Image: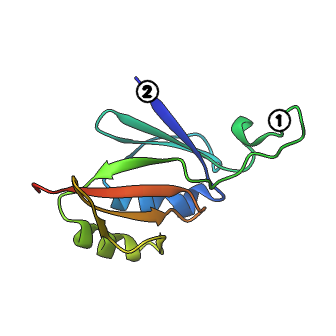
Amino acid sequence: MAAFRYLVDDVDKALPFYEALGFVLAERWGPAFAIVTRGDVHLWLSGPGTSARQPLDDGTQPGPGGFNRFVIEVDHLETTLTRLEATGMKRRSAPVSGPGGHQALVMDPSGNHVELFQPRNA
């Protein structure tokens, strides 16, 4: 099993975004932490107050954001973007095309990036 951890500002605001991507709430450990799953992918949503948000030895305060991201393959990019707009999703890019298909970069409510990818053959 592999899991990804995303630091979020508010787990309750993050859940509808990830549910709109087909994730299912698997576990909830109080208001600051949830695990959502989609197939074999386990995503840990860590809000303020979790161990992952504690300052590092050098004083750095972990927080959401950056350009690291995971990729969700979708059947219909535009349909998925429309569904996510209802969650308050922020687009980082208009859909672009490349040799393998079409993609768009979006942000969850805390500013974490998610790449939506529609293969050319879909």
Q: Image quarter for residue 87?
A: bottom left
- The amino acid type of the residue labelled 2 equals Ala
In space, the residues marked 2 and 1 are separated at their CA atoms by 23 Å
In the depicted view, which residue is nearer to us: 1 or 122? 122
The earlier-in-sequence mark between 2 and 1 is 2
Q: Residue furthest front?
A: 99
Residue located 74% across and 43% down the image: 53
* Residue that sits furthest to the top in the current view: 1
Q: Residues within 10 Å of mark 1 (few under 14, many from 20)?
A: few
Q: Quadrant of the C terminus?
A: bottom left
Q: Residue, x 33% and y 50% (percent of image)?
A: 72
Count of numbered marks: 2
User: How far across and down, in percent of the image, does residue 29 sit?
Assistant: 59, 40
Q: Amino acid at mark 1?
A: Leu
- The residue at which mark 1 appears reads as 56
Which labelled disc corresponds to residue 2?
2
Mark 2 neighbour density, 10 Å: few (under 14) some (14–19) many (20 or more): few
Which of 73/7 is in front? 73
Q: Is residue 23 visible?
A: no
In the figure, 16 relative to 60: above or below? below
Q: Quadrant of the N terminus?
A: top left
Residue 2 appears anywhere in the view: yes
| Residue 85 against residue 112 in the figure, above or below | below
On the image, the x and y values in percent for residue 70 come to 43, 46
**Secondary structure of the residue carrying numbered label 2:** loop
Residue 98, by quadrant, is bottom left
Residue for point 50% across, 37% down: 4
Residue shown at 51% from the left, 57% from the top: 113
Instruction: Measuring from the top left, give residue 3's x and y in whole percent.
Output: 47, 32
**Coordinates of residue 28 in the picture (x, y in percent):** 53, 42
Badge 1 element: loop
> Do callouts 2 and 1 mark residues in contact (Cβ within 8 Å)?
no
